[in-house]
Amino acid sequence: MKVCIVSDSHDDAQALDGVVRKAASEGFAAVIHCGDLIGGHTLRPAMYAGLPIHLIHGNNLGDSFTLHRLANESAGQLLYYGNEARIELGGRKIFAVHYPEYGYAMACTGNWDLVCCGHSHIAEITQVSNVKGGKTWLVNPGTVAGLGAPATWIAGDLLAMHFEVQNL
């Protein structure tokens, strides 16, 4: 199962839509958005691609009322979790949170196969040693909007547990 991991779209509907449509055309099964979407209008064009979107809000909350309403009206296409998300996709346990330091801490627990975060606007893929003696993937897709850093997202394959930074 391939997943599109994005973050920090900061009201750039065009950038988010472009990435989600590309992911849909390449057979991706879902989108994980690691926060700082801001307004619900940013999400609307991307929803036409038809992929399920898992969304947390980040530190720039924006319009949570509209996000809740969109989720309720989406027949399960938009899943809005609030501050953090616990997701199961492709047989993998995934935790999504906006802040990298919180993501690192959750990766250290060993309770997750993949931890996704955002906030820094810097794309990064690492494996973190966890307290259970294994390693957990920690990925930060950077900023899909290209704010203060190149516009990036992450293509993930949950079967192979392979992740790759993609440039817009």
Image (cartoon, rainbow, N blue to C red):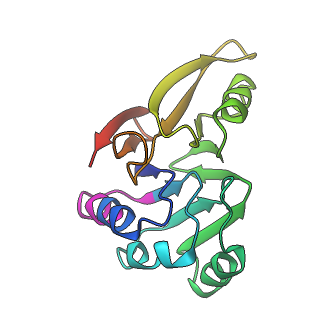
Q: Position of residue 67 (x, y in %)?
A: 64, 76
Residue 24 forms part of the magenta stretch: yes
Which residue sits at x=40%, y=59%?
29
Q: From this viewpoint, which residue is outermost toward the front?
A: 148
Whether 69 is drawn above or below 166: the answer is: below
Q: How many marks?
A: 0
For residue 41, side relative to residue 100 (left or right): left
Q: Position of residue 166 (x, y in %)?
A: 30, 41
Instruction: Identify the magenta region.
Output: 20-30
Most foreground residue, 148 or 59: 148
Residue 130 visible from this viewpoint? yes
Rendering quarter of residue 71: bottom right
Which residue sits at x=62%, y=68%?
79
Which residue sits at x=43%, y=42%?
148
Residue 106 forms part of the magenta stretch: no
Rendering quarter of residue 118: top right
Whether 62 is drawn above or below 60: the answer is: below
For residue 24, side relative to residue 68 (left or right): left
For residue 155, side relative to residue 33 (left or right): left
Whether 51 is drawn above or below 145: the answer is: below
Q: Position of residue 30 (x, y in %)?
A: 45, 59
